[in-house]
Amino acid sequence: MDSSVAIEINNLTKIYKLYDRNRDRIKEALHLSKNINFREHYALNDVSMTVKNGETVGIIGTNGSGKSTILKIITGVLNPTYGEVKINGRISALLELGAGFNMEYTGLENIYLNGTMIGFSKAEIDSKLQDILDFADIGEFIDQKVKTYSSGMFVRLAFAVAINIDPEILIVDEALSVGDVFFQNKCYRKFEEFKKQGKTILFVSHDLSSISKYCDRVVLLEKGKKIGEGNPKEIIDMYKKVLVGQLDKQVDTRKSQNLSEGKKWKDRMELNPSFDEYGSGLAEFEDFCAYDKSGEITNTIIKGEEFTVKLKIRFFESIQEPIFAVSFKNMQGTEITGTNTMFEKLSTGTPEKGDVMVATFTQKMSLQGGEYLVSLGCVGYRKGEFTVYHRLYDVFNLTVISDKNTTGFYDMDSVVIVRKENEEDR
């Protein structure tokens, strides 16, 4: 194995047997029959990749693509069916936080238990103990049994143990967003510190903003196979196509093509299965979507780029000046921003019964990287009374990818200049 390589994965395959009946599983385990019916499921299928020393490599993919499976094989939690993994360096893994904790032990006892399991001597753990205690910041609870901890305290301690062991290779699986916002900030600072120290990091996350910001290279998995590898922007663009089933289709840069294909626009979106809707029934959202600057229907938008929300509304009565609206909430339900045709001083006329109106809201994405929920509305005044014709609350999400976040909900896109004082400043 080349000394410049930290992790080498060759032709890795993991197959699970799926049985129609539990008794078939038992029969095969006990060798009671040779004719057992089962199906083979490839969690990983002939995956190869190399991670060099000092690299931060991201792994992304849809649920069930094999991301967690490959990390568990690398860390020795699972054995592969075929293939091999070579490791050059000591690993600390942030997978299932606290998986090795004994609930009857105190927090302090679990620190020594976990450190020993990783391969540290008592003296080495002693030298790291204060850093772990400071990072976890759970005070006197460190001397209480962990079964008495809140879930937040539990993951803080587990994260602190894993992150302060000073590994040569750090494996992270969706573990940076634990605890409150201040602890999350501490986790990301530690992560950045590891990068500056030249540690090797293998990073799995659905947070595409973090993948874009931190990773030197990204691997894309889909249904157990590696389908792409390259720089973060290139692979994130591929992933966006995978999410909407468009990977194998040629994308025309004209916005009209993607939107005029046979099936409905919303069928190519990832929708919220439990969105809320209501209205008078006088009008109805027939179709809707979001698309990026290339015309690709998507739930993922790059911060700073132009995007559009497009609506199609059918009317069942003549309605004067209907108001079309789009709004954005964060995942905590706080309404961040939104607009409508009345705010924009746009006349919508008087659609007649049977008419279908199309509205497009195009803007620059200035929200911080993260997840947002989109709501749509068609309202107005009928016989002097405010009337909701049709509303769709939190009907789909938008993931904003950013490699630079500022404070608050949106980026002011500031131009910042720093220079030495001159006569004009005095």
Image (spheres, helix red, strand yellow):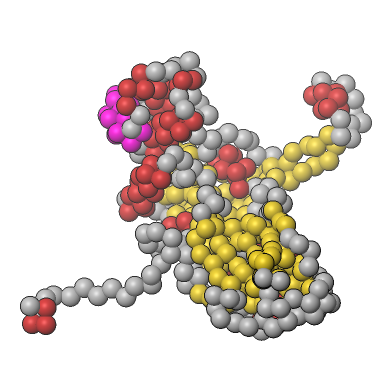
Pick the front one: 396 or 203: 396
Residue 132 within the magenta-colored segment of the rendering: yes
In the displayed structure, 285 sits above or below 45; it is below
Question: Quick check: 328 left or right of 44?
Answer: left
The residue at the point 54 percent across, 75 percent down is 343
Q: Position of residue 187 (x, y in %)?
A: 39, 44
Q: Position of residue 276 (x, y in %)?
A: 69, 53
Q: Is residue 356 visible?
A: no
Range covered by the magenta-colored residues: 123-136
The residue at the point 13 percent across, 75 percent down is 420
Q: Position of residue 369 (x, y in %)?
A: 48, 60
In the displayed structure, 290 sits above or below 149; it is below
In the displayed structure, 64 sits above or below 102; it is below
* Quarter of the figure with the C terminus: bottom left
The residue at the point 89 percent across, 31 percent down is 36
The residue at the point 60 percent across, 76 percent down is 341
Question: Quick check: 400 left or right of 167?
Answer: right
